[in-house]
Amino acid sequence: MSAPALIGLSPDHLRRRFKEVGVPGYRADQVAEWVYQRGVLEPEAMTNLPQELRGQLLADWSFRALEPVRVAHSTDGTVKAVLRASDGVLVEAVLIPEEERTTLCVSTQVGCPLACSFCATGALGFTRNLDAAEIIDQVLRMRELLPADRTITNVVFMGMGEPLLNLPNLIAAVETLLHPKAFAMAPRRVTVSTAGVVPKIGELLEAVPVNLAVSLHAATDAVRDVLVPLNRRFPLAELMQTLRELPRISRRHPVFFEYTLIDGVNDSREDAREVGRLLRGLPSKLNLIPMNAHSDSGYQPPPPERIDAFMGELVRGGVTTTLRRSRGADIDAACGQLAVREAAG
Ligand code: SAH
């Protein structure tokens, strides 16, 4: 048996575990500071701890959950890493540096059970959930790749997997991101995206005050059933009613919708008008993502003029819309392209 991972634990959790073995709580805060704030993962280097405790930490805990296997750099600055867990499974994480911020896109599952028809991860099928340590080690490992004058300012749970099907580990990881003695991130800098696991949305927002993103992709059940098969279990009416009843959603905390535009599938003016009708009155912003093509589906992005027309129609319908410039497509790091396979490379 290998030692349990320390890095998935929030400082509060760590305090409890330390107390159980007679180590005072403030020591947990010191360890959390070394690990999460300074990125120091060798107990020997934690110089404000007594030597005996350093030895105990080394013996009782593991400080890593993932090993980087490959790192790819896009011409636009995007960095994708393939990381291996202790049982050999592979996950991907993507760093997206911009002028004002550096966003990290993390995975929550190995593969994904939802099988959205346009998503490369969906084509992999599902292997297993990541635990909190494996989620947090993506943050630590990716931060280590940044130059000294940069740090991760935003975390989006938009990598491989459906976060809301891995809720306990997701919540534990978010708690560590937000905790003032750990990563101390502001809640508005953490975003969880879901394909619409309706019964878990309220539970997530009651546990942690993150931004909510919802993968919409269609404004009618007929189209959404095909793109997001989960829609057959939780159709649009149910999803929208749940979103409208969330106490946290307001103009200051809108729902962020993602809409992947696919040539000839969901990109007509009428589709755009339907989106406007669906979102009316709900504080929200919509992110348009032209389909990133990949070999697991025949779908293509619409031509630029159709994207413009779609966006124009949304704006006329009162939908706050942004067009997401895809990043990292040359290294298969763009939305929906995360599909590392164990056999690969
Ligand atoms: N399972 C969650 C988290 C994944 S987020 C969710 O569905 O929200 C990844 C986002 O990229 C989702 O909005 C997903 O629908 C979108 N996406 C998947 N494949 C894509 C592709 N080929 N091109 C553009 N966006 C894609």
Image (tube, rainbow, N blue to C red):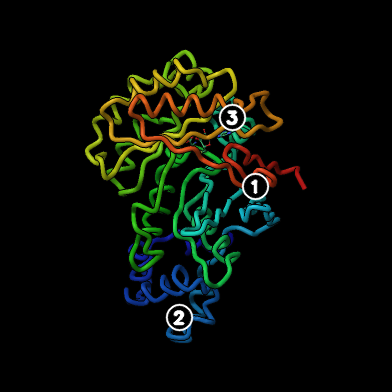
Above or below 196: residue 32? below
Percent position (x, y) of residue 335? 57, 39
Percent position (x, y) of residue 242? 29, 28
Local secondary structure at mark 3: helix
- The residue carrying pointer 3 sits among few (fewer than 14), some (14 to 19) or many (20 or more) residues within 10 Å by Cα, namely few
Residue at image x 34%, y 58%? 186
Above or below 113: residue 97? below
Check disc 2 and give the amino acid type: Leu
Residue at image x 47%, y 58%? 101
Mark 1–mark 3 distance (CA, rounded to whole Å): 38 Å
Residue at image x 54%, y 57%? 97
Check disc 3 and give the amino acid type: Pro
**Is 226 left or right of 154, judged from the image as shown?**
right
Q: According to the image, label 3 marks what residue?
A: 304
Q: Which mark is residue 89?
A: 1
Q: Tell which circle, 1 or 2, labels the residue nearer the N-terminal end.
A: 2
Nearer the camera: disc 2 or disc 3: 3
Residue at image x 33%, y 28%? 318
Percent position (x, y) of residue 298? 68, 23
Nearer the camera: disc 1 or disc 2: 1
Q: According to the image, label 2 marks what residue?
A: 53
Depth check, front residue: 48 or 255? 255
Mark 2–mark 3 distance (CA, rounded to whole Å): 60 Å
- The residue carrying pointer 1 sits among few (fewer than 14), some (14 to 19) or many (20 or more) residues within 10 Å by Cα, namely some
- The residue carrying pointer 2 sits among few (fewer than 14), some (14 to 19) or many (20 or more) residues within 10 Å by Cα, namely some
Local secondary structure at mark 2: helix
Nearer the camera: disc 1 or disc 3: 3
